[in-house]
Every structure is written in C-alpha cells, then in structure tokens.
Amino acid sequence: MIVVQTPWSARNPADLGAVLSEARRTLVAERPVIAVLPHADGREQDAPAEAELLAALSQLAKQNDVFIGASSFVRCSGDPAPRTVGYLIGPDGNTLLRAPKVLPDIVEGFTDTIADTFKESEFKSVATPAGRIGLLCGEDVLQPQLVRAAVLAGTEILLNPARERRDQLFESRMAARQARAYENVIYIATASATAVNRGNVSIKLPPASMVAEWWGTKVAGGGEESFFTADVDLETLRRRRQEPMGNLPAIVRTGVYGPGYRDRAGPAKASPQSRDAWIAEAKARISAQVKEPTAPKPIDRYEVALCQCISQGSIKPDQLLDNRWRNLETAIDVVNWVARSPAVKLVVFPEFFLTGAASPLGSRSSHIAHLIGISFPGREADRLAKFAQDTKSYVAGGVFEFDPAWPGRFFNSAFIFDDNGNLIHLYHKIHCADVFGTLPDTTPGSIYDQYVQKYGYDHLFPVVDTPIGRLATKICFDMNFPETARGMATRGAEVIIHPTSEPHNIRRRAWDIGRHTRAFENSAYIVTCGHGGEIRAHSQQQLTFMNRGFSKVVNYDGTLQVVADGPGALPLQGSIDLKALRTARRNAKANLLIWDDPVVYQAAYNAGRGLPNNLWAGDPVVNPYEQMAQIKAVIESYNRDGVYTLPVGAAVANQNLDNSRSAAMA
C-alpha cells in the first residue's frame, strides 16, 4: 500500500504521477497496489465537476497501474452546493466505489458544502485482487457506527482520505482510527496532506497519515515526506477473522442496539448548505443536548477514588460466601482512608472484586447462582450502602448479581449507591465472556425479549442524574464495543464508570486505546477501576498479576488524567470537572455526539448481523455458548454471506470438502 501525503490538485491530479512512480519503484512484491491520496487541495469554492475529477483520477490510476482511493470537494449534478465524495478507482480506470461524506467538515471549522448527515447511507465494499475495500471520508471514520456498517458490508481495508489539522483533539482523532481497526478487525489507511496551498502560500499541516491494524499497531507518516508504504497482509487478516476469540464484529450484538437506533432515527432531511448554516445547526443540537444540572445542590468539581485491590478467588462453592465477605472488607480497607476525604464524592471498585475473576464454576453453574451472585438488598450490598453513608460518597463497582426474579440465572452487574446508601443504579453487562463459554452469567441480549418486556428498552443503557453528574456504568469487555458507551451518552451520561478485570495480554494496548476513544467520541469522563492482582483459586493460592491494574481516569477529550501504572493494591485519586465537560460539549468542533443520527446507519444494525438475541432464553442450565459455538456460527454466516472472506487455505479445504461430498453423492 502507498500512502501519499503530497498535496494534489483535483483539477490536475496528474502532478502526482512522479510521486506514485517513485513509490512504485520501491515496491518489490508482485501484487496489486493501493494508493491512498489525501483529501484534494483547495477550497470548496474551487470544486471541479464530478465527471471532470473522475476522468483525471481514472487516467492517473491507469498510468500508474494502481487502485486509487481519494476524496475531493466536487460539484455533483442536482446538488445545491459542493460536497465531499470519496472514490475508489481501479487500475483499469473504472470507478469501483463512490462514498459521499456523512459528517460535516468539523476539522475545517465547517465549510460551504452539503453532507449526508441526516439521511440513510448505503454502505458498500468492493471485492478487488487487493482485498475487499471500503471508504469513509475524513471525520466519518470517527463515528463508530459508520465503520461498523462498512465492515458488515464486507470491508477488510478501509480507506480514509482526510485533511487533518492539529488542535487539542488531534491526538484523540488519530487514536480513534487505531481503535476502529481493533474493534472491527480491519486495516484502516488514512492519508492526510502535509500542506494546503492558498495561492502562493503553502500552509503546513501535521503529519497525520497512518495504516493501522487490529492489534493497535500502526505505520505512520512523519515530517513532510511525500509518501510512505505499508504491507497489507490479507491472509493474516482473514485467518484472524476465522478465530472466535476476540472476534468483535462477530460478537457484537447488533440486535440489542438496532431497535433503539430505529426508534431514535429522525426523518431524513436536507443538509445545511453553508458554513453559517452548519454552525447554526450545531448550536441548535448543542442546545438540545447539553442540559444544566437538575439534581439538588449540584457539585461541579470533585475527587474520585479508585480502589485497585487484590481479590481472592475460589472454584469451590462452599468458599464463595466466605470469600465474598473477606474480599469486600479487604477492598474497603484499601480505599477507606482516601474515601473519607471531604473532596472525594465517588468511590469505584473493580469488576469481580468480591469473587475474583477466577470464581465462575464452569459453563453450567445455574444451580448455584445464589452462591455466585450477591443480591440487592443483601449482606454485601448492605455493607456497601453503609460504607457510602459513612464516607458521604457515591459508591460504584462490579459484581455477580443474583436476582430471585430470574431463577437459575445471575448477571454481571454494575451498581451505584448514593451518599445516603440508596441503590440508585444497576446495569447488566451487555457484552461479556459468556459468549466464549467461560462465564455462565446471563447478558440482556441472551434473554432480550423477556428483559425488555420486564424493564423496558432504556434499562439496557441506564443513566442516573445525581448532584455529581449524570452517571452511567459499563463493565470490562463492554469497552470494546463503542455502541454501548454511545447508548449511554445519548441518554445524557457525563461520567461513565468502568469496573474492569482486564487480563494482561496482546489485546491490552488496543483495549486501552479504545478506553481513550470512548471518552473522546462521547465527550465523557471514563473512570476505569481494575484489579491490581488476584489470588488464584489453586491449592497453593498463587498470587498473579495477570490483572495488572492500570486503573485510570480519562478526560472527556480522550487525554490521560491519572493512571496506576502497574499492579498491586492501592487507592488512586482523580478529578471530575463537570463544568469543564459541559463547556467542551458546547464546542461544535469537539462534540461528535451531536452529529450522530441513526437514520444514517440503523438499517445496517437491523439487518440480522452479529450475535443473535434470545440465544439463552430457555433452560438456564443448558449453556448455548459452550465451546464458542455461537461465535463460530456467526463467523460461518459471515463467510457464507460475504461479510468475511475465507483465507486461501480455508477456501481450498472447503472446496475439497465440497468435491468429496459431490463424489460421495455420485
């Protein structure tokens, strides 16, 4: 792959011929070449006719024998103003893909253009010898549902022609591109020019081009280099997509999100046509979204205390009850002295802090659900309520929960007690390790119809309005699915509390990039509290630091505020400034949330992709997720329907199997 950083003219892209020729000379492997160009130089007022641009790009692609991905301001027949459109041109000069921009030109401070912000988009990918290619222009890649929709349409390599500028959110936008690659098991290739030309003046821009892959690694441009190259290993990507573990596009519960998107989608409407109209639209949306505090005696700024503790696990039912109480008192002891500070208004415990992550007793534990999960009210819940009263703080954390209303089941739940000891919030984890057959907890999607009938749809994404802000929770693995945090942010969440128990493995870096991206894309604080270690449930009671802490507070702009940069038991303090957050949400260039209208993508989420709902609506003892059976079934459906492309070896094996079956039938 060639990633070009040289500015180019939409009226005369042939000037890039020398750059592409030099780049091609450095390549050795004989395989199809993709060249990604940045968004074309020039202002929207200089936009050429679409036919003129396509003719020039066609000639450039043929002359250099490359696939070209690019975007430009263009004038399209029937449109009242210019717009940005992205294109994929084949080496034969044919236009293979056309992708009108969805979001307005936020980084540019808005432009005199139109965009498809408020109408349904058609997400496509095209099969080429270089892979299945999709394209999203500029800021569109920052909206997670747009990338997901492109992937569900078959995309393996997502081209992102852009024009980036440095501001306080620049690093967060770049990290978001890496997060998208991990969340969707794709390559993302962003090309951004290192300058724009205004008459005789060349205005320098930051190096912002990169090719990111799914483990959180990237190849990035630097300085003013004209281009760089990156290897795209399609076979490795395709083999990775056949693996059930961590296969997020196959695990995503689109059926949980889709109904809400359908209900929330506004009617399609015409786009603003000028910079002034876009700014006016932004102000109106901000006014509707950013609410002043309604709770009595609101507190704008306060401290949060994270209890990074070490828990003791067990795989013996008769030890679970004793361990729960011992772990609770141990955790309280870690954070108690900090929690009593008058400045601290929120205390957060990790996921599994009462049982340890190793405690679930196999995939069929329904008969001891009451031993695995605590109840509200109950002994441990009452102790936490008393702790909240004693410290005059809100107290949150993650636990296995047994609710007698759901016999034979338990949930992986997050709770919040207020400073009077009242339980004000319960969230049931949407995406969990249940899908791997390793945790036997029930998730709402597994019993979707019963769950929504009992609680209502909004209970999937609960947000509670308090004097210390609008609070929500999500748990551990949920962090990998941007749809969950977005569901909470659209319901007003300002502080998303994240009890977690993340293992230390190849995925941890990408998880952490995602954590910062969740904060940036929702303009919300992310408060992550993790385990500092765990005493494993073996005869020698071995202490392990597989859960290595890294508790942290991420600011609403995606920047790091504070982190416990290693394992061990410790209290970590951070700060929440709600007034600053609300000010940021009033900034039209910072608030991505205002441009999220599900009318654009709801059809993709309601098309039956991803992990189906109601898979465990029957007998709680019969676990349908054992041996990752349901993820494997989704992968098989993706292979069949063209969402995934089989690696060469698997394709040959399947063909041999088909031939054997045909011979046997004959």
Image (spheres, rainbow, N blue to C red):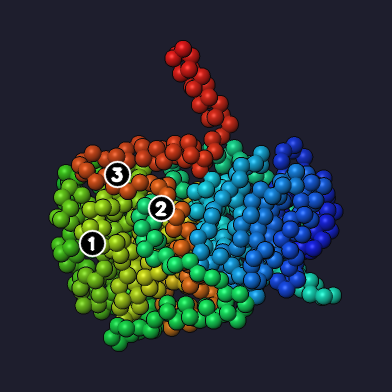
Q: Amino acid at mark 3?
A: Leu
Tell me where residue 170 appears, x and y as whole percent. Answer: 61, 69
Looking at the image, residue 300 lies above or below residue 358: below
Q: Which residue is mark 1?
A: 455
| C-alpha distance separating marks 2 and 3 | 17 Å
Q: Amino acid at mark 2?
A: Asn
Label 2 CA crowd tier, 10 Å (few <14, some 14–19, many 20+): some
Is residue 559 visible in the rendered image? The answer is: no
Camera-near label (2 vs 1) is 2
Q: Which residue reaches farthest front?
A: 78
Q: Amino acid at mark 1?
A: Tyr
| C-alpha distance separating marks 2 and 1 | 21 Å
Camera-near label (2 vs 3) is 2
Q: Which residue is mark 3?
A: 615
- Image mark count: 3
Q: Residue shown at 84%/58% (left/top)?
A: 15
Label 3 CA crowd tier, 10 Å (few <14, some 14–19, many 20+): some
Label 1 CA crowd tier, 10 Å (few <14, some 14–19, many 20+): few
Q: Which residue is mark 2?
A: 606
Tell me where residue 566 appears, x and y as whole percent. Answer: 45, 60
Occupied quadrant, residue 645 = top right
Q: Residue shown at 51%/81% (left/top)?
A: 283
Looking at the image, residue 481 lies above or below residue 575: above
Q: Secondary structure at mark 3?
A: loop
